[in-house]
Amino acid sequence: QVQLVESGGGSVETGGSLRLSCATSELSANSRRCLGWFRQAPGKERKEIASIYPGAGAIYDIDSVKGRFTVSHDNDKTTMSLQMNSLKPEDTAMYYCAAGIRPFGRSRCRDIDYDYWGQGTQVTVSS
């Protein structure tokens, strides 16, 4: 059973920074592994922020975070991080990490391909 454990959320003021971490297991050796960060604000749908793939770098899905957020993983691929800089009140949400296996024939994972989810960590940005 793959387990994802998130940490690093909290409350900051506008312009502040936070670093989220997601510790994973079991999937680190799989070449079709996908790891993603999602967020869900109150009353809104969950959205994928970014995903990262072995040997292929990261894909960012929300334009408003490009240049401010950076997703990465450590050398042994067991911990994924999300560095969030220049935070804004609209970044306030519950943040989740997720893991899955990219289907054959696809260049990236879709939402439905993420089978494993972390418990979520709250990020609150005050104005």
Image (cartoon, helix red, strand yellow):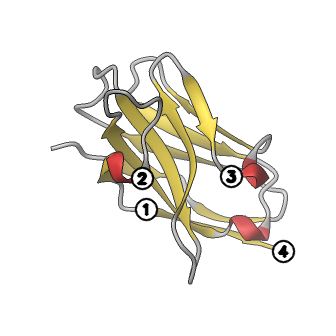
- Looking at the image, residue 22 sits to the left or right of residue 67; the answer is left
Q: Is residue 104 above or below residue 55?
A: below
Q: Is residue 32 above or below residue 25?
A: above
Name the quadrant of the N terminus.
Answer: top left
The residue indicated by pointer 4 is: 127
Which element carries disc 3, helix, strand or loop? loop
Mark 4 burial class by Cα count in 10 Å: few <14, some 14-19, many 20+: few
Tell me where residue 24 sits by quadrant: top left
Which comes before the other along the chain, label 1 or label 4? Answer: 1
Q: Nearer the viewer, residue 70 or 100?
A: 100
Which comes before the other along the chain, label 4 or label 3? Answer: 3
Q: Amino acid at mark 4?
A: Ser
Which comes before the other along the chain, label 3 or label 2? Answer: 3
Which element carries disc 2, helix, strand or loop? helix
Q: CA distance from mark 3 to mark 1?
A: 19 Å
Mark on residue 62?
Answer: 3
The residue indicated by pointer 1 is: 120
CB atoms of marks 3 and 2 within 8 Å: no
Q: Amino acid at mark 2?
A: Asp
Where in the figure is residue 115, as x and y percent of width and height?
Answer: 28, 50
From this viewpoint, which residue is outermost toward the front?
105
